[in-house]
Image (tube, coloured by chain):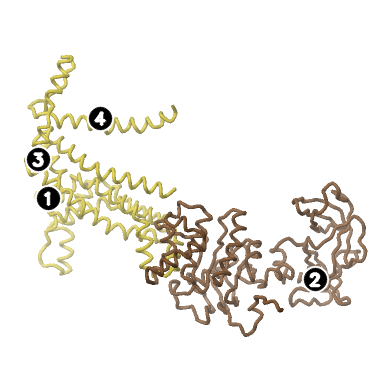
Amino acid sequence: MEQHVFAPWLNPDEKPLIQFKGVTKRFGDFTAIDNQTLDIYAKEFFALLGPSGCGKTTMMRILAGFEQPTEGQILIGGKDMRAIPPNERPVNMMFQSYALFPHLTVWENIAFGLKREGIPKDQLNARVEEMLRLTRLAKFAKRKPHQISGGQRQRVALARSLAKAPKLLLLDEPLGALDKKLRQETQFELMDIQEKTGTTFVIVTHDQEEAMTVASRVAVMDEGRIIQVATPADIYEAPSSVYVADFIGDVNIIQGTALKAGDGYDIAWAEGRAPLHSKREGDGFSPTNGASVALAIRPEKVSISAEQPSGVTNAVKGRIIDIAYLGNLSTYHVELEGGQMIKAQTANTRRLSRRSYTWEDEVWVSWTDTAAVLLEG
Amino acid sequence: MRKFALIALPYTWLVLLFFVPFLIVLKISLSDLALARPPYAPQLDLSAGWQGIKDFFGGLDFENFIWLTTDDLYWKAYLSSLKIAVISTLLTLMVGYPMAYGMAKAPEEWRPAMMMLVILPFSTSFLIRVYSWMGILSTEGYLNQFLLGLGLISEPLMILNTPVAVYIGIVYTYLPFMILPIYAALDKLDGSLLEAAEDLGCSRFTAFWLVTFPLSRSGMIAGCFLVFIPALGEFVIPSLLGGSETLMIGKVLYEEFFNNRDWPVASAVAVVLLLILIIPIVLFQRNQQKEREAGQ
């Protein structure tokens, strides 16, 4: 049986729900978004990820209608949104501060948007009850926002923004105010609710782990530009640039020059050392001979051993400078001859006392010819 | 012990500056008019010992309070004061709210200057400011000259020495007390609440009525009390701008003290005024308390 994979972005016949067409947004001299084009499909859980000030919040506010693009066009469901004010868009937003109305109870907060639609009272009640159940808030319906905990407030905000059954739900750093444990629980809850309601979610976050956990696709942004849009696995395994590789997770970057060799490239990285070999290039990158490149290797793909390993393409000798012990994992900081630092991460499957190398020991670090990605340096 | 010392300070203040003067006024209100100096009897004569104290308390009675009920001047003055205070408080709210709203919506860098403008009139003597309204409102005043000059009216308007002048005076004088608490409430308002209201389907106008207005209620209540309480006992404004036909309890009080030199009756009027004022003061305290609790 063929397994169905949710990937509407690969289907050329699929119509995107949201289209950014050459959107630019300037505030005075400052360009918050620089001529960006992006498609987001129905039922996606789409994450806009980037450091603060990268323009991700502005993208979201343009979708909600609180900002107008300086240039370009936004379409939702094929309809141009330019002249449509926020209160008439099929979009609801969950605010970073939650923006719960302090003078209204939890119940009234959730009912707020429904009341504006003027739907019959029994339908309204039923819908609010349904939202209270979905977010497990039934017990707190009569409380005011200041009488409930932060996690509960977060769920009220979610229930309120979902109550009108919007086509698109925008979430601005929805878990930013929660502590780490609650955040992780809530991430799964969000995914669950997204699946149950079938709503398209667009989430803005600066937390890469959060984006990786919840999203079907992630857009990594920097200085008003989208650097890469891909699934979390592709973003991690096949970053398209050093910026993305470095922003998501931990990475070793080795600078060098490329030379076509066999089915891949040899990378000359240090005077008098054997070149490194790599068979994988970043998306659409084919370096010419002698081009300067960056080799990106994830620490967990680097093996460390006391003896020289045999049958591995890339093996380099070095010395352990530092060991970061994380319990289940350890990260070794190895200085290669010539000064290049490499991080190697291994699972601590053996007891610590039985480890065959420690600080200041000479070790070999090695990786296969497909472990690293060759990027423009 | 330290806690007690801390509480003792405001209580000493309250006892010295409120309770002791109140007891003195209460005592005078229970005394009788006398041609003496001070102009009331009995006087506490401690040199006569126990008998003196007994004579003193024996001489106190509620005569003056009974007198207040027999002459309709007093309750008419109380009612008229109440009416003028209520109307002028509402007028001040109507004028003050838009001003406070405008200040809260103004660009950040303008706000200190606007705040200054609101407070600035306080730097001139209150009396002079009320006098200058006489110059504006009188039949030959600037307002009438201006309106006649524009041809909007052919006869000068009679404003001075009417209740309208009193309303204008009170609104003008107490406006800052209304603006500042409302501004404080509006300034605290999180802008994302209005965006959330719009996002959930409100127009700008309904967002104002459903979010901004209820959330500035505590500021409005505070402002109203701050205007109502002093306006009720106001003396200078009605006596300078209101003329003889405006009856206010502050004026009656003044006349009893200084024209009739009937200190006991004047004190009785003051005690009753205080009792009337205690109700709004208690309500005001409640409002402040509730707001503090909600703010936590």
| Disc 4 residue type (three-letter) | Val
Q: Which numbered circle lies on residue B246?
A: 1
Looking at the image, do the residues carrying marks 1 and 3 touch, with CB atoms under 8 Å apart?
Answer: no
Q: Pinpoint the chain carrying mark 2.
A: A
Chain letter, brown: A
Looking at the image, do the residues carrying marks 4 and 1 touch, with CB atoms under 8 Å apart?
Answer: no
Question: For mark 3, does the 10 Å Cα neighbourhood hold few (<14), some (14 to 19), or many (20 or more) residues?
Answer: few
- The colour assigned to chain B within the rendered structure: yellow
Q: Pinpoint the chain carrying mark 1.
A: B
- Which of labels 1 and 2 is toward the front? 1
| Disc 2 residue type (three-letter) | Ser
| Disc 3 residue type (three-letter) | Thr
Q: Secondary structure at mark 2?
A: strand
Residue B204 picture location, percent across and down:
38, 68
Residue at image point 36% right, 67% down = B206
Q: Secondary structure at mark 1?
A: loop
Identify which residue, B51 or B101, lies in the foreground: B51
Residue A131 makes an appearance in the image: yes
Identify which residue, B25 or B51, lies in the foreground: B51
Residue B102 lies in quadrant: bottom left
